[in-house]
Image (cartoon, grey):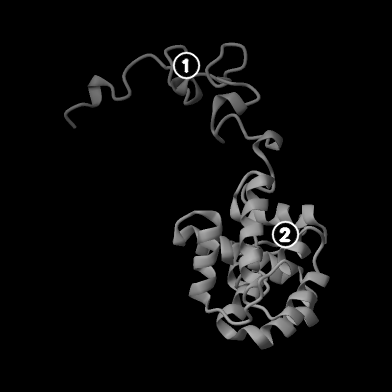
Amino acid sequence: MDESTFLDEVAWRGGLGETSSARTVSEAVLRAFAETLVPDEARALAHALPAPLDAWILDGPHFGSLSEDALYRRVADREGTLLGFAIEHTRLVLGVLGDALPETTRLRLLRHLGPALGDLLAPREPLPSPPVHLRRPAEPERGKGTTLATGRPGSLKPLSEARPERAHADSVVRAENPHGETKLSSSRGLTQEREQETLAEGEPGPLRPVSERGR
């Protein structure tokens, strides 16, 4: 770890935008934090840091015993800002510091600082994995059966590849000889012609002669 990496991480996590802002915040927090350490612990911490971060720790003073509230107030005084901003900046910088420190150095500081200040150096926990029921299922192989739970949006056969029928089953569009029954060239005749009931095929006289009526 070098100074640039440390400050870039502070700027990114805190949304500070500029490295100069991250440097100002980091210096105020680390100098105030050094006051919570005894000289031996300050030297162990400085040994794990690049320049000029190590100098901010070594310069002192090293009181060796400060409360969490006192630390925040010292940061606010150094920054010339409100206590709320000082609390936010302290947790930001010490969080980055905790992630950057070797485990042996961090554990040594924790033994002296106690749980309240020691928690400020706790490494960030990795994001938990999503629950099983929220994980995205593996995509099925094409051609294999799919269900609503495993299927993908869309159709296995896109519309661009479809060849829909352009007419229903009884449509004249699909017939080989549309209107064939009524065309003169191919028709077997109208209904009367097919039933042989036209004038040309009829016999003279009524179906029932007059002589037979009344019987």
* Mark 1 neighbour class, 10 Å CA radius: few under 14, some 14 to 19, many 20 or more: few
* Rendered location of residue 43, percent (x, y): 78, 75
* Mark 2 neighbour class, 10 Å CA radius: few under 14, some 14 to 19, many 20 or more: few
Give amino acid for label 1: Glu
Q: Closest to the observer: 151 or 138?
A: 138
Q: Closest to the observer: 55 or 172?
A: 55
Please tell me whether mark 1 sits on a helix, a strand or a loop: loop
Q: Residue at x 69, y 44 (%)?
A: 157
Please tell me whether mark 2 sits on a helix, a strand or a loop: loop
Give amino acid for label 2: Glu
Q: Which residue is mark 1?
A: 201
**In which quadrant of the rendered view does residue 140 lie?**
bottom right
* Rendered location of residue 79, percent (x, y): 55, 55
Q: Residue at x 75, y 61 (%)?
A: 53
Can you see residue 93? yes
**Residue 212 vertical position relative to residue 30 in the rendered view, above or below:** above
Q: Which residue is mark 2?
A: 139
**In which quadrant of the rendered view does residue 143 lie?**
bottom right
**In which quadrant of the rendered view does residue 93 lie?**
bottom right
**Residue 106 vertical position relative to residue 28 in the rendered view, above or below:** below
Q: CA distance from mark 1 to mark 2?
A: 74 Å
* Rendered location of residue 135, percent (x, y): 64, 66
Q: Closest to the observer: 98 or 65?
A: 65
**Residue 23 vertical position relative to residue 104 in the rendered view, above or below:** above
